[in-house]
C-alpha cells in the first residue's frame, strides 16, 4: 500500500533550527512536496524535490533521498509565525498526491 | 486576485439534505481536485478532474459527485448528507495532471461543513 509517515507534533524554540522528517512508500514516484498549513487555513506550497539533494528557499530547505524513501524539511531561524502544520506529500505514478497527516510544529519564545 | 476560490466558507445543515460547494480557479489550470480534511487533519483526495478524465477515489461514497461546467469550475454536490461528512473540504488546481514536473497544487480557502 501507499503510505506517508511523519511525526505528529514537534516543539522548537524561536530562533532555533528544526528538522521535520518524512518517509514515504508509493507506487512509483514523481516527486515529494512540502506544504505549510496554518490552523483554519488552506495548505500552501513550500517545496518540491524529485531528484536526490537539497532545495533551498529562504529559511526553508528540503532534502530528498529516493533510495531511502525519505525527505526532511529544515526550518532555520524559527519565527513564531512558523507555528503551523507541515504536510509531506508524495506523488505516485498516476500523478496523485499521497498526503501525510502533517506535523504540528509549536514554536515557543 | 484570488487564485482558487470556494463558496460557501461555512456550511451548517441537517442530515439528509443535499448541498453543493462551488469552486473556481482563475489560474488557467487544466486539473482541479476536491479533498476532504477530517478532524485528524488527513487530506484525502476525493476527485481529480481535467478535460479528459475524471479520477474518483474508490472510497468516496457515490453520494458525492463532482460537476464541471467548464475548465475553471469544479463543483461538489453531496446528496443525503450524513454526520460523518462533517469536515473541511478543499478545492485545488494544478497546471496539468500528466506533466509530472512541479505539479504544485494551489488550494482554495476551504469549506467547513457541519452536518447536524
Image (cartoon, rainbow, N blue to C red):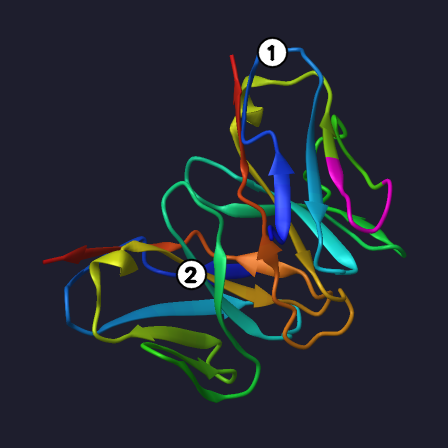
Tell me the tag on residue B25: none
For disc 1, the neighbor class at 10 Å (few under 14, some 14 to 19, many from 20) is some
| Subunit under mark 1 | B
User: Residue A8, how many percent across, how many down?
Assistant: 32, 53
Residue numbers of the magenta segment:
B69-75
Residue under the point 16% across and 72% down: A16
Q: Residue at x 47, y 56 (%)?
A: A100
**Front-most of residues A73 and A68:** A73
Give left or right: position of B69 versus A57.
Answer: right
- Circle 2 SS class: strand
Q: Which residue is situated farthest in the right direction here?
A: B52
Give residue B74's position: percent from left, percent from top.
76, 42
Left or right? Give the position of A74 relative to B7.
left
Q: Residue furthest front?
A: B1
Nearest to the observer: residue A95 or residue A4: A95
Decide: few, some or many residues near mark 2? Use Cα within 10 Å; few <14, some 14-19, many ≥20.
some
Image spot of residue A29 (x, y percent) = 63, 74
Q: From what the image shows, is residue A27 above or below residue B51? A: below
Which type of secondary structure does the marked residue at label 1 adopt?
A: loop
Residue B101: percent from the left, percent from the top?
Answer: 67, 77
Q: Which residue is mark 1?
A: B15
Q: Residue at x 54, y 40 (%)?
A: B110
Label 2 resides on the chain identified as A
Where on the picture, by quarter, is residue A91? bottom right
| Mark pair 1, 2: CA separation | 34 Å
Q: Tell me what residue is drawn at x 74 percent, y 36 percent.
A: B75
User: Would you say B66 lies left or right of B4 here?
Assistant: right
Q: Is residue B71 magenta?
A: yes
Q: Quadrant of residue A5?
A: bottom left
Please name the residue that numbered disc 2 is placed on. Answer: A5
Amino acid at each position: 500500500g501507499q503510505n506517508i509517515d511523519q511525526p505528529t507534533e514537534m516543539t522548537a524554540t524561536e530562533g532555533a533550527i528544526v528538522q521535520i522528517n518524512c518517509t514515504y512508500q508509493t507506487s512509483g514516484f514523481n516527486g515529494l512536496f512540502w506544504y505549510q498549513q496554518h490552523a483554519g487555513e488552506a495548505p500552501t506550497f513550500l517545496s518540491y524535490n524529485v531528484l536526490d539533494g537539497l532545495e533551498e528557499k529562504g529559511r526553508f530547505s528540503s532534502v530528498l533521498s529516493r533510495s531511502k524513501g525519505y525527505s526532511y524539511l529544515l526550518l532555520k531561524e524559527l519565527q513564531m509565525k512558523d507555528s503551523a502544520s507541515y504536510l509531506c506529500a508524495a506523488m505516485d505514478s498516476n500523478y496523485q498526491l499521497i498526503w501525510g497527516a502533517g506535523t504540528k510544529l509549536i514554536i515557543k519564545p | 486576485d484570488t487564485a482558487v476560490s470556494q463558496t460557501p466558507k461555512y456550511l451548517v445543515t441537517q442530515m439528509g439534505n443535499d448541498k453543493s460547494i462551488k469552486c473556481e480557479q482563475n489560474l488557467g489550470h487544466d486539473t482541479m481536485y476536491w479533498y476532504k480534511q477530517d478532524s485528524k487533519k488527513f487530506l484525502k483526495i476525493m476527485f481529480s478532474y481535467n478535460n479528459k478524465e475524471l479520477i474518483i477515489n474508490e472510497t468516496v461514497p457515490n453520494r458525492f459527485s463532482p460537476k464541471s461546467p467548464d475548465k475553471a469550475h469544479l463543483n461538489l454536490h453531496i446528496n443525503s448528507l450524513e454526520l460523518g461528512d462533517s469536515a473541511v473540504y478543499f478545492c485545488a488546481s494544478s497546471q496539468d495532471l500528466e506533466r509530472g514536473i512541479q505539479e504544485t497544487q494551489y488550494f482554495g480557502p476551504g469549506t467547513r461543513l457541519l452536518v447536524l
